[in-house]
Structures are given as C-alpha cells and as structure tokens.
Amino acid sequence: MSTPRELPDILSKDFAADPYSAYRVLRERAPLMWHEPMNSYIVSRHEDVSRVFRDPVFTTANYDWQLEPVHGRTILQLSGREHAVRRALVAPAFRGAELQATFLPVIEDNSRRLIDRFRDTGSVELVGDYSTHFPINVIVDMLGLDQGDHARFQRWYTSIIAFLGNLSQDPQVAEAGMRTRAEFAEYMLPIIRERREHLGDDLLSTLCRAEIDGTSMSDEDIKAFCSLLLAAGGETTDKAISALFANLLQHPEQLAAVRADRSLIPAAFAETLRHTPPVHMIMRQPAEDVELGGGVVPAGSTVTALIGAANRDPERYTDPDRFDVLRADLKTTTAFSAAADHLAFALGRHFCVGALLAKTEVEVGANQLLDAMPGLRLADGFTPVEQGVFTRGPAELPLVFTPRRTMSGAA
Ligand code: HEM
C-alpha cells in the first residue's frame, strides 16, 4: 500500500496549520492509509480508532521505542496481568475519594498562587502565565518534590513530549530526550532512596509503600513512573485548560453560560476534549495480522490512531466541527471514565489513569480564573492559533479583564 500523492501528509506544514480539514479527507477517502515517512498505517474514523484502543490485539509495544528510551519501562508498555497489577498499584491515588481528601487543597493552592501574580493587573497571557505551570506544580507537590526545581521539570517534560512526538526522527530531539533520562535519574533516584527512609503522606511515599500480591515497585520503576507522570500529566492538562478558554472565548455566549452556571464546567471540558483534544494521536502495534479500516494491517507494524480525527467523525457527532458545550451527543457523566465516547483519554486498559485528576484541576482552575477575571475577553485583535501535531493546543492566549479591585474601587 502506498500513500497517494493527493492525500494529506501528516508531516507537512499545511497539516500542522490545519489538521482538521486533512482529517476530513482521510476519514472520507483513506480510512486506512500507509504513511511511508512515518513507517506507519494511519486510521481516522471513530469506529476504527476506538477499536484500536479497545482490542488487545493492538499492543503498546510501540512504547518500547517511543518512550522507554526517555522514561525507562512504564505501565504504558505493559499488558495483561503485569499491566493490571502495576496499574492497581498506582490507580488508587488518582481515584475520586483519595483525590478529594488528599490533593484537592494542593490543587486549589497551586491555582490560587499563580492567579495571585496577575489578578490585579487586568491582563494575562494564560498559556505562559498559568496553564504551563499549574498542572506541573500540582504533580511536583503531590510527589513531595521541590517547587524550586520547577524550571528543570518543565524542561524535562517538554523534551520527553518532543521525543514522543518526534514523527520526523529529528536526531537533536532524540538526543535531548536521552539527556533528560540521565538527568532525571540522577535527580530522582537519591530522592526515592531517601523517601523510603522517611515515608510521608505524599504520592511518592504511596508509590514506595504500594504492594499487591507481593509485587512492589523498585526504585527504577518509581523513577520511570514519576517521569511518565510529569509528561503525561503536565503537557496534556496544560493544553486542555488553554484550549477550554480559547474555545469559550471564541464563543462568548457559551462563556457567559458557563460563567453563570459553573456546573457546566465539566460539560465544557468534555466538549473541549472532543473538539480540540490535547493528544491528537496515539500509536499501537498489532500482535497479528488484523483487518482494520477496510484493509489488513500486518503483525508488528505501527498503527497511528488519529484521536483528533475520530473525535470529529460526522458518523458519531452531529455537526462535529462546531464547539457546543450543550451538545446532546456527548455524555458528560461518562466523559472522564473508560466509558467515554470521545477518545481524548484513549479507551480500554490504558485509559488515562489521570482523567479524574485532570477533571479536578480543570474544574478548580476554571472556577478560580472565572472568579478572578470578570469581563474576560481576548486581547484586542487577537485570534487564537493552535500549535503542535502530536500534542496540540493554543500557542498563546493574551487576555484582558476588569480586576476585582478596580471594580470595588469604582463602586
Ligand atoms: C486532559 C488531560 C489528559 C489527557 C488528554 C490525557 C491523555 C492520555 C491518553 C490518550 C492516554 C492513553 C495512552 C495510550 O493508550 O497509549 C493516557 C494515559 C495515561 N495518562 Fe493521561 N491524559 C491527561 C491527564 C493525565 C494526568 C493529569 C495524569 C497524571 C498525573 C495522567 C497520567 C496518565 C498515565 C499514567 C497513563 C498511562 C495509563 C496506562 O498505561 O495504564 N494523564 N493519558
């Protein structure tokens, strides 16, 4: 199978500028496409992408080369019982009750501290001043690490995500990823050894203590998992918050509805995950030859599942390019669980462990931001532009608002 010339090229500038019209062409004309430069089959329809996530014949062996070089071995690569046991070790910390009890104050404090820096100014660049810091600060606090090292964490997770999305195999990106692995190990391993001696109530201590059926996590396992948490929980939630505000600000009537009724925030977040997901593609490797998208994908090949395309499949969603917080064909009640119908958190065994944490962060963040920023709007003449192909979100979001102090001073 070859890639016909007239079909969109995922590595092209046109695609990066507007993947959504390319997704439409792929869904309609090439639901299974071979892409030579990526050495990968590509699927784009909701039915096929969701099958790739649910059917265990599609293994996650791709992470052996896509992530292990930078993280070490993580649960993303595991399957069957080994995956179930490892996942059960880490999942309780991310469930509703534990989250609310232990980590809600951490989430609220971190959001408030960032907003304090701009709440009296009347303007903010939301991506650089808030979104890129908030989720990473939360994870650093949850793990009981040093906030003073924030700049390092941010550099590390940016280089890990670049490695993961290095579709064109840029050697500099690969090299930076390898450096990150060495630096992170040098930083983290002594902290883990020390923490084992002085266990506390932070997530790192929970990981040190965790044991199921005689299985516990080695220092190397914990280091790899922390590295995964920084990347998986940082870049994604950061883009989700920025995209939520970009979407609402471009639909002022929907922003007004959410401002007036905050119980709509989860629906607005779910619709953001569908319409503009932070992760646009995820790969898999079939264990045997398998029929998919009207063709056969051979065992051991790579399949790229286009989440961004599947989430706008007109077979699944009415008027899919429209952002609509009140859309009837997207269920908010299941949107943050493995029963979700949008595919932003994937589905099946590897369904995002941090989905509820992301939801809590977005709810807290959006509520606090709306409270702090009456009269919120995009800076004059500014139109949001998305950036990124593997992960994607607004490049920047300059906003203006009426500070509360000014309002009460005028009153
Ligand atoms: C809006 C925010 C988020 C999005 C869109 C997102 C997306 C995803 C996706 C698509 C996967 C599946 C990967 C695959 O199947 O190959 C995943 C898995 C995962 N996510 Fe998230 N994620 C988000 C937030 C978080 C947060 C906050 C954390 C934790 C701090 C987290 C931790 C993880 C972990 C550990 C896995 C691997 C689960 C496994 O292999 O069983 N994610 N995420």
Image: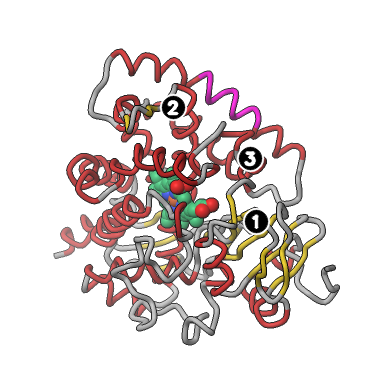
Q: Are marks 1 and 2 in contact (CB under 8 Å)?
A: no
Residue name at image x 67 percent, y 82 percent: 28
- Name which of mark 1 and mark 2 comes first in the sequence: 2
Residue 63 position in % (x across, y down): 61, 44
Q: Amino acid at mark 1?
A: Pro
**Disc 1 or disc 2, which is closer to the eye?**
1
Residue 166, compared with residue 72, is above or below; it is: below
Pointer 2 residue Cβ closer than 8 Å to ligand 1:
no
Give the residue pinned by disc 2: 149
Residue 400 position in % (x across, y down): 38, 62
Q: Where are the magenta residues, as a range?
A: 178-186
**Disc 3 or disc 1, which is closer to the eye?**
1
> Can residue 166 be seen here?
yes
Mark 3 Cα within 10 Å, few/some/many (few <14, many 20+)? some
- Name which of mark 2 and mark 3 comes first in the sequence: 3
Asked whether, in this view, residue 128 is left or right of residue 39, the answer is left
Residue name at image x 36 percent, y 66 percent: 335
Residue 68, compared with residue 251, is above or below; it is: above
Gap between marks 1 and 2, in whole Å? 40 Å
Q: Quadrant of residue 14?
A: bottom right
Quadrant where the N terminus is found in the figure = bottom right
Please name whichever residue, 215 or 13, is drawn nearer the observer in this view of the structure.
215
Quadrant where the C terminus is found in the figure = bottom left
Farthest residue, direction left: 411
Q: Which mark is residue 286?
A: 1
Mark 1 Cα within 10 Å, few/some/many (few <14, many 20+)? many
Q: Amino acid at mark 2?
A: Asp
Q: Quadrant of residue 68?
A: top right
Q: Are marks 3 and 1 in contact (CB under 8 Å)?
A: no
Q: Give the colouring mode of the picture.
A: secondary structure
Pointer 3 residue Cβ closer than 8 Å to ligand 1:
no
